Image: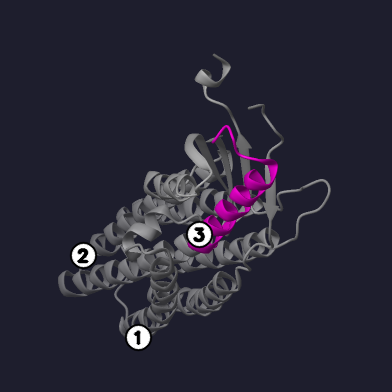
Amino acid sequence: MTDSAPVLSETDAEPGSESLLTVAIAGLMNLAIAAAKLVAGLLSGSAAMLSEAAHSAADTVTEIMLFFAVRNAQKPADERHPFGYGQSAYLWAAMAAAFTFVAGGLFAITHGFHSLHHAQEDTDYLVSYTVLAIAFALESVSFVRSLKQTRTEAKRLGLRPFHYLRQSPDTSLRAVVLEDLAALVGLVLAGLGLLFTEITGDSRWDAASSIVIGFLLLLVAVRLGHANISLLVGRALPSAQREEMRAIIESVPTVISVKELLTLQIGPHSVLVAAKVDLHDEATGAQIEAASNEADSALRERFPQVIWVFLDPTPTDTDFE
């Protein structure tokens, strides 16, 4: 058997409309929350509230960048970019993590340390408590929305939501989930800082909560940045999915075995699959074409994110003997 040209299949990528809506909702929530926290922080003089305002402002900028990430990833392929613009989403998301989260985190930390040495004056904390409660409710709406999308997509792929979130190439969705979770935790920390400050009269509690919020943001930034860089460089699908793809291809009657299987996540909703396959020596050209089409269809049916499939008929070493 001699090598033949790879077989190529292509369909349009799934639109990221769900992710776009999730990002838009999160962005609008964060914008309103940031304004409310800023007013409350200025009125109360609370370091934690001002840090939370910076947190929400950073989140708002993040959502704007993620919105562009999702939109750019949906651009159709062209002559200069035959595999589409999916990877641009990872670039935008990495920039969002590096700039907004780190900027918000560093502000919270530095402002907290500054407040440790500058005691705040006694004030009425009712405004801050009210804003924190409203912010918690609004953040919960965004968080529930992102979790709903996570469960839906995880169910479609047969994964648990937590495992899907760890493996998901949709970094915009992952960013919103982690962002909302960090926001809810940050609100609790800010509330505790204010409460202990009010009870003890020691503003260092408030400053300490600001510092903890800052480190929380840095942790999220590092986590998201690492995930986006990994995808931007070029990441394969998880081993379990690769093995299932190998089994699907090898189940085609004309295929003896898959000698090599390569997968590449080239966008939040697009995957490239390339495989070197050993076929029966007596297979005709028509049988090879039929086997290629059968494997292509089976892969797409099981994994809707598969957009390109390359199969390269490759003889074994014994075929040359």
The C terminus - image quarter: top right
Which three-letter amino acid code belongs to the residue tagged 3? Phe
Q: Residue lying farthest left?
A: 200
Does residue 287 show up magenta in the picture?
yes
Which residue is the site of mark 2?
Answer: 202
Q: Which x, y percent locates residue 226?
A: 46, 43
Of marks 3 and 1, the one in the foreground: 3
Which three-letter amino acid code belongs to the residue tagged 2? Asp
Magenta residues: mostly which secondary structure? Answer: helix
Which residue is the site of mark 3?
Answer: 303
- Relative placement, left or right, of 46 versus 294 is left
Give the residue drawn at x 50%, y 19%.
318
The N terminus - image quarter: top right
Of marks 1 and 2, the one in the foreground: 1
First to last magenta residue range: 280-306
Tell me the distance, in whole angstroms, between the alpha carbons under discs 3 and 2.
Answer: 57 Å
Does residue 219 show up magenta in the picture?
no
